[in-house]
Amino acid sequence: MASFIVDGADLYHIYDVDGYKYIDFTSGWASNNVGNIHPEVLDASIEALKKYGFVYNHPLAIELSERLVEITPEKLTRVSMEVSGTEAAEAAVSYALTAKKRPNIISFYGSYHGDSIGARLIGAHEAGRKKYFEALEGGGVIYIPYPRSYKLPPGMTQDEFAKYILWYLDDLILEYHAEPERIAAILYEPMLAEGGNYIPPKFFPKKLGELAKKYGWLIIADEVLTGFGRTGKFWAIEHYDIDIDILVTAKGLTGGLIPIGAVVMSDEVAGFEKAYSGSTFAGNPAGCAAALKTIEIIYRDNLLENVERYGMEALKIMREWVDKYSFIVESRGVGYFLATSIETGKGDEADIEIAKRIFIEAKKHGVWVIWDDEPHIRIYPPLNMPLDILIDGLEKLEKAISVIEREYKEGLIKLPEKRQTIEFFDF
Ligand SMILES: Cc1ncc(COP(=O)(O)O)c(C=O)c1O
């Protein structure tokens, strides 16, 4: 990932060591949801550090657990503190397997649950992430496609693809891979974040939920990136009609200042069977204090409404890019969970190269976006970013896109060779 060295930050901006200022469309990789170094979150963390330093048993963990139970679906009543999103996602899977006493989970191609070996194996972000670890894959994870909206199978709409995936799961997987009673849970990102910022059709999670109910599967919602207001609701599952049993949170949980994660789950999951998770600094006092303050700020400052409204304005602008620029094929998003995708028709590597150039050019224009070796530009502003700064950032980004479009059209960009694939659909 092309990057630069940060020298400082204020709520909505980043400054680099060369003295340049950037509008921050990354929020610490979707973690600093109430802005970079929010002063109240910082004060709360310092207070907790002064009072408790690091101890394992402290009242803030109880207070935060109670608050998390209040702001998650009613069925979720138990909390396990963790230290990161990776640890929380792994813990959620271990709780689910233990509770159900079944050996398999369903997971999705493109999903990212962290970068430890365990998290790489329960997700499928990209093939390269499993290189040299393939042998550790024990078979307990059954992958199915995620209902994305970009580079669909030829001739299929996103809805048709999503229906195909449900059929693939209910018909092929259960007939040929594992019987339903051998599956414990579905590990699901309600919107696929690192995998490309995709938003499934409304019916998809509803039907997943119906399957889960029919077969006794738990649903684990990994809300590490989509949670804490990112999509204009506190949790992305609130956009859908789906019942979940376990919710995984981290990143925005503490306003990004002190790392902690948490698993919030039902009695059925955590109530009976002895299960294991956690590590030394899980639920540390400063992290819990930061999380309590972050929750307070999100509600007190009505950030969810801002994000919903301003996010729609942003998306309107970004959708115009599809008509204006030859290689922009889709802009999508909800709230401050936004992305635009590149497709040149010259292969995946060429699309990634164009996105990379836009990312670099955008920095020259004073806006910092997310690009992670992918054919997309992702935009995750802090939830409290005002509309004028948001629009200014989008205008700067559009200038960068237009520079790259001109260079592309003039043949000034050397694109990688197209990987030869078989043309299945030209008969
Ligand atoms: C959905 C999801 N789960 C888990 C993780 C891992 O979280 P962390 O980086 O805090 O370990 C991420 C990180 O991007 C994520 O997006």
Image: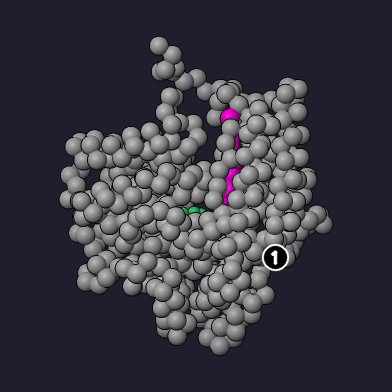
Q: Is residue 251 magenta?
A: no
Name the residue carrying label 1. Answer: 11
Spot occupied by residue 343 in the image (x, y as percentages of width and height): 58, 30
Query: Residue visible at 41% across and 78% down?
Result: 66
Spot occupied by residue 110 in the image (x, y as percentages of width and height): 44, 42
Spot occupied by residue 34 in the image (x, y as percentages of width and height): 61, 66
Q: Quadrant for the C terminus, please.
A: top left
The magenta-colored residue range is 337-343
Point out the residue furthest to the right here.
19
Secondary structure predominantly adopted by residues drawn in magenta: strand
* In the displayed structure image, the side of residue 412 where residue 129 appears, left or right: left
Amino acid identity at mark 1: Leu
Point out the residue furthest to the bottom here.
51
On the question of residue 353 being in view, the answer is no
Spot occupied by residue 262 in the image (x, y as percentages of width and height): 42, 68
Point out the residue furthest to the top here.
427
Q: In the rendered image, which quarter is residue 65 located in?
A: bottom left
Cβ of mark 1 under 8 Å from ligand 1: the answer is no
